[in-house]
Image (cartoon, helix red, strand yellow):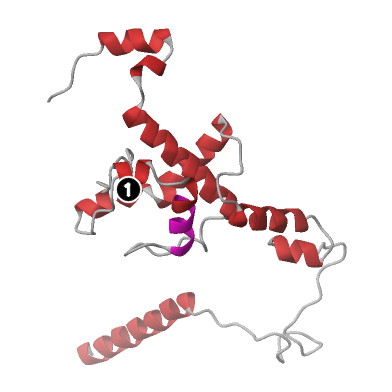
């Protein structure tokens, strides 16, 4: 009796493993394959009445006559620009900050000094944005690094759209300015706050 129960448990566990695998690799039909589930024998189904077919992406929008050509043209213009083609507004900086936090911050850190959490855990530290070489580098340098990769950093062209790369460039410039701003160029209120702030450790 005990052996029968053990055998039954083993069979049940094997069935659970099969069901678990089916959740990962779900059974599916190839387009236009035969199917016994439907009366017409085809696995491909006709969309319901009044359904609107929609395909995503700029080129899909262009081919279907919708507004995709403008998006594709913007990507091309952003990719070919020698310097940041967008006006540096608070909206652009916020977009750059958001994209930076997603794609750059883990290695480059919130301050851009190359001491991100990934680097602290053993990944090689990227250079700080605050060294003279990168402070004096043209905007296009940062755009190209994101587009093509540099050293051990892989290309982010498949994850960050060209306009967003320029937004990140603008935010990097803001990070650099945050660490190297001339106190005399600050508004009077900011200079007063700076004068009252306690000095940090030397």
Viewer-proximal residue among 85 and 27: 85
Segment tinted magenta in the rendering: 142-148
Instruction: Tell me if residue 201 is in the magenta stretch.
Output: no
Viewer-proximal residue among 46 and 134: 134
Q: Where is residue 161 drawn, in percent x and y?
A: 57, 55
| Point 61% across, 56% down: residue | 80
Q: Residue furthest left?
A: 202
Q: Image height check: is 87 above or below 133?
A: above
Q: Image height check: is 191 above or below 60?
A: above
The answer, for residue 163, to whether it is visible in the render is yes
- Residue topped by disc 1: 108
Tell me the quarter of the image containing the N terminus: bottom left
Q: Where is residue 65 drawn, in percent x and y?
A: 84, 62
The local secondary structure at tag 1 comes to: helix
Tell me the quarter of the image containing the C terminus: top left
Label 1 CA crowd tier, 10 Å (few <14, some 14–19, many 20+): many
Quarter of the image where one finds residue 131: top left
Viewer-proximal residue among 2 and 93: 93
């Amino acid at each position: 009796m005990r052996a029968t129960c053990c055998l039954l448990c083993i069979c049940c566990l094997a069935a659970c493993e099969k069901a678990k695998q089916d959740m990962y690799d779900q059974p599916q039909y190839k387009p236009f394959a035969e199917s016994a589930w439907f009366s017409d024998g085809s696995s491909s189904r006709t969309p319901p009445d009044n359904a609107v077919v929609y395909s995503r992406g700029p080129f899909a929008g262009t081919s279907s006559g919708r507004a995709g050509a403008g998006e594709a043209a913007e990507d091309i213009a952003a990719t070919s620009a020698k310097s940041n083609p967008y006006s540096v507004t608070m909206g652009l900086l916020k977009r750059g900050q958001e994209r930076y936090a997603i794609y750059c911050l883990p290695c480059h850190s919130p301050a851009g000094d190359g001491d991100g959490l990934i680097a602290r855990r053993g990944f090689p530290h990227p250079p700080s944005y605050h060294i003279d070489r990168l402070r004096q580098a043209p905007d296009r340098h940062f755009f190209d690094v994101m587009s093509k990769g540099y050293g051990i950093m892989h290309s982010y062209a498949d994850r960050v759209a060209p306009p967003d790369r320029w937004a990140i460039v603008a935010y990097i410039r803001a990070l650099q300015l945050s660490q190297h701003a001339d106190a005399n160029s600050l508004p009077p209120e900011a200079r007063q706050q700076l004068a009252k702030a306690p000095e940090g450790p030397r």
